Amino acid sequence: MDSKIEFRNASRPDGPPFRLSDASLAEIERLAKRYPTREALMLPALWMVQQEQGWISETAMAHVAEVLGVSPVKVYSVVTFYHMFHEAKPGKWNIQVCHNLSCSLLGAEKLIELLQERFGVGIDEPTADGKFMIQRVECLGACEHAPVCQVNEDWLFDATPQSLAKKLDELK
């Protein structure tokens, strides 16, 4: 399978060379016996990449496409669809702010403004020291506690600029 694709920023995959570990490749082959097609292994394979590399580079997407025998654009479309996958090296602390209807109506934009002012970066850009990254996500599934943020695996329900600022101070 030809793994060349025109990615967003280059005519060839960008990023460090990547190959899944032998253990992950063996796990994919073990899982393949339980899945109807190799394409159905896409999410487990991408999780393995993210566990090994911390994010999913374009070269890693091309490698997954080759391993699964699918087109690189299919892999790219899955990575870019799900906010749980990082297309760039994330910060130590990833701050996800839900901006769906409930969260937006109850102040999500103020939270994003606070984060951008505090860190001086845009969405999906890690800070210069690599400690923080702001992500605007579609839904964190906790509308009854809107607005909602997630810092790595920790939740911040009914978030306000004050409660978010306090949480950020705790992370330093």
Image (spheres, rainbow, N blue to C red):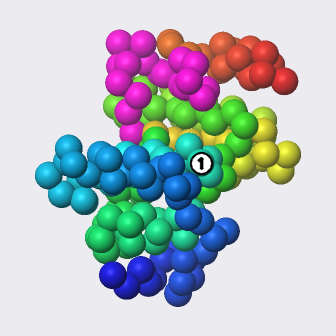
User: Looking at the picture, does residue 98 appear above or below residue 17?
Assistant: above
Local packing at callout 1 (Cα closer than 10 Å; few below 14, some 14-19, many 20+) is: some
The residue under the point 85% across, 46% down is 129
Classify residue 14 as left or right of residue 6.
right
Check the image and report above or below for 88 versus 156. Answer: below
70 in magenta: no
Q: Position of residue 86 (x, y in %)?
A: 54, 50
Nearest to the observer: residue 159 or residue 78: 78
- Give the amino acid type for the residue marked by disc 1 in the picture: Glu
* Quadrant of res 154: top right
Residue 149 lies in the magenta-colored region: yes
- Please give the name of the residue rendered at 29% of the width and 70% of the height, measured from the top-left corner: 70
Q: Is residue 99 visible?
A: yes
The vertical placement of 107 against 124, above or below, is above
Q: Which residue is mark 1?
A: 52
State which quarter of the image contains the N terminus. Answer: bottom left
Q: How many marks?
A: 1
Q: Which residues are magenta?
A: 138-155
